[in-house]
Structure formats: C-alpha cells, structure tokens
Amino acid sequence: MAIRPVLRMGDPRLLEPSKPVEKFDTPELHALLADMQDTMRSLDGAGLAAPQIGVGLQVVIFGIDHNPRYPDAETVPQTVLINPTLAAIDEELEEGWEGCLSVPGMRGLVPRYKNLRYRGFDQYGKAIDRTVSGFHARVVQHECDHLAGILYPMRIRDLRNFGFTRELFPDDDIADD
C-alpha cells in the first residue's frame, strides 16, 4: 500500500488517547494495516501504533525476527492487536533499553512489567489472549502506551539513562533509529 510519515515527539496528536475500533474486517481497516506494515518494515521497527501515523484508533502491530535496531532481541510473532487490554501477571519490573520511531535516534532505559497478559482482537474480530514475558511483553506495553498518548521517555526514571543511540552505545552495532 503506502509508507506513511511517522509523527515525531512534539506533535500533539501523539498525546491524544485513541478510540476503539468498532468494525472489523473492513476495507478501511485492512488498508490501514497494510500501510502500517509497510511503514514499520521500511524503518526496521519492532512495532507501530496507528497514532504514530496520525490515526487515532486502538490499533497496534508488532513482531520481530531479526532487526538491526534490536540485534539481540528474541523473536516476537507478527501480530495485529486491536482494542487491547493489558494486565500485569505480577509486580516484577524489568528495565530495558527502548527506542521509538517517533523519537528517532534516541534510546532510554524504561521499566516495564516482565510478565504480561494481553487481550484484544485481530483485524477479523477474532479474539487474542496471550501471556508473554521479556522482550515480547516490553514491545506490547510500548506500543499500547501510544494508544493512551504515552511516549517511552515519559516512563524513564532517571534521565541520565536517555540519550542519542550512538553516544549511549558507541561500540555496538545497533542501527541508528
């Protein structure tokens, strides 16, 4: 379909809460998802939320096999998640480095729940119910934060752990965002 421009931090649309999808399996929803997939792949993203391309709907996509932006990340299945709800399995938090297509070139150390259950629907309205941990849980939380108007820098506890990727990891082969 089309690669869409990704909104960047500072654009007020990224701070607005998204609305639930009311109809599944529509040409409009399929076109949106195709554009999101094209956009995410073109930028080597691990995920993308509809608000990042200016669409205020509760739609996220994510998935990773091998990604130059996250060279050590575990595999996460390609997923379409609509109208998600998230529930922590326990209170265990894990800090990890995150980047974002809406905050290009930067990384930050973000606490996230290590173990998570998420529910929602795919593009056809079929229910999704998964219990996940580690990087998979982190990606889901990051993308779903976008639906509430939250960008990962808002979750950083210590801003000394936030900066440009190349300065934070000068000896690593992490692709610049």
Image (cartoon, rainbow, N blue to C red):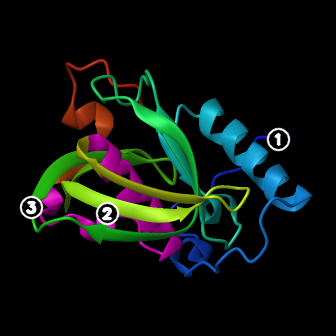
For the magenta stretch, what is the residue range? 135-160
Question: Which amino acid, by three-letter code, is at mark 1?
Answer: Ala
Which circle marks residue 92 in the picture? 3
In front: 121, or 162? 121
Whether residue 85 is in magenta: the answer is: no
Quadrant in which the C terminus is drawn: top left
Lower position in the chain sequence, tag 1 or tag 2: 1
- How far apart marks 1 and 2 lie (CA) works out to 28 Å
Left or right relative to 49: residue 176: left
Where residue 46 appears, as percent x and y from the top left, is 47, 39
Q: How many neighbours does mark 2 have within 10 angstroms: few (below 14), some (14-19), or many (20 or more)?
A: many
Q: Which residue is mark 2?
A: 153
Identify the residue shown where x is 17% and y is 61%.
159
Q: Which dot, 1 or 3, sits closer to the camera?
A: 3
Q: Percent from the top left, x then y, of residue 20?
A: 64, 78
- Which residue is painted at 30% across and 18% down in the image? 173
| Numbered circle sitting on residue 2 | 1
Q: Earlier in the sequence, mark 1 or mark 3?
A: 1
Residue sitting at the far right: 27
**In which quadrant will I find the N terminus?**
top right
Cα gap from disc 3 to disc 2, whole angstroms: 20 Å
Query: Overall secondary structure of the magenta stretch?
Result: helix
Q: Position of residue 130 (x, y in %)?
A: 39, 54
Residue 119 is situated, as x and y percent measured from the top left of the image, at 46, 64
- Is there any visible trace of residue 177 in the rendered image? no
Amino acid type of the residue tagged 3 in the rendering: Glu
Q: Residue at x 64, y 58 (%)?
A: 126
- Secondary structure at badge 2 equals helix
> Which quadrant of the figure has residue 73?
top left
Relative to 125, is 68 on the left or the right? left
Q: Residue at x 40, y 25 (%)?
A: 175
